[in-house]
Image (cartoon, rainbow, N blue to C red):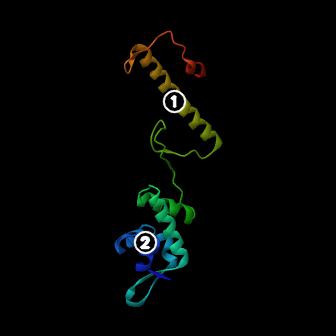
Amino acid sequence: MKSVRQLKDILGLNTIHQTRNRIKAVEDVIQPYIKRGENNEILVGDEGVTILTKLQDLYESGLLLSEAAEVIRSDYLPGEEDDIDTDSYSTTSLQPKPKSKVDLIDYLMEELEFQRELILNLARSNSEGDIGNKKVDNNENKWWLEWL
């Protein structure tokens, strides 16, 4: 069992407060591995240390602490999956994920149509004017139009 001070060193953090923030971020996941010691000191078991180390690795890779905690929760807590597609390039944000193959095909066809319209609008706008400082030749062979 490791104390908060020991966890601070293991995780490479500067303050005990940072360690407590990480424990709180994944408290629901590491709760079975936490015990109270002398003077109500927080003690974390080896499995809890492993989870906190993974959380810290995700945080150091560029995720926000809340995002890293969500990844840890999805890995360790059964049955808690996000039902929201947060792909920023999709036609509408926050669409539910398709539940069946037919729904998936419909979703992909809708996405394909949206991307096709974007390409056509871009091609139309580029053929009407300048791109940067260069004039666009309207007779230029636009190879991507063959794919539409």
Q: Is residue 107 left or right of residue 25?
A: right
Q: For the residue labelled by badge 1, is the local secondary structure a helix, a strand or a loop?
A: helix
Q: Nearer the viewer, residue 111 or 2?
A: 2
Horizontal and vertical percent position of residue 37: 43, 88
Q: Are there few (<14), some (14-19), or many (20+) residues within 10 Å of tag 1?
A: some
Q: In this view, does 123 lie above or below 106?
A: above
* Alpha carbons under labels 2 and 1: distance apart: 43 Å
| Residue 23: mark | 2
Q: Residue furthest top?
A: 139
The residue located at (56%, 31%) in the rendering is 112
Q: Earlier in the sequence, mark 2 or mark 1?
A: 2
Residue denoted by label 1? 115
Q: Which amino acid does label 2 sit on?
A: Ile
The residue located at (54%, 57%) in the rendering is 81
Q: Which of 57 and 145 is in front in this view?
A: 57
Horizontal and vertical percent position of residue 121: 45, 22
Which quadrant of the figure contains the C terminus? top right
The residue located at (51%, 63%) in the rendering is 72
Tag in front: 2 or 1: 2
Q: Is residue 129 left or right of residue 58?
A: left
Q: Is residue 117 above or below residue 51?
A: above
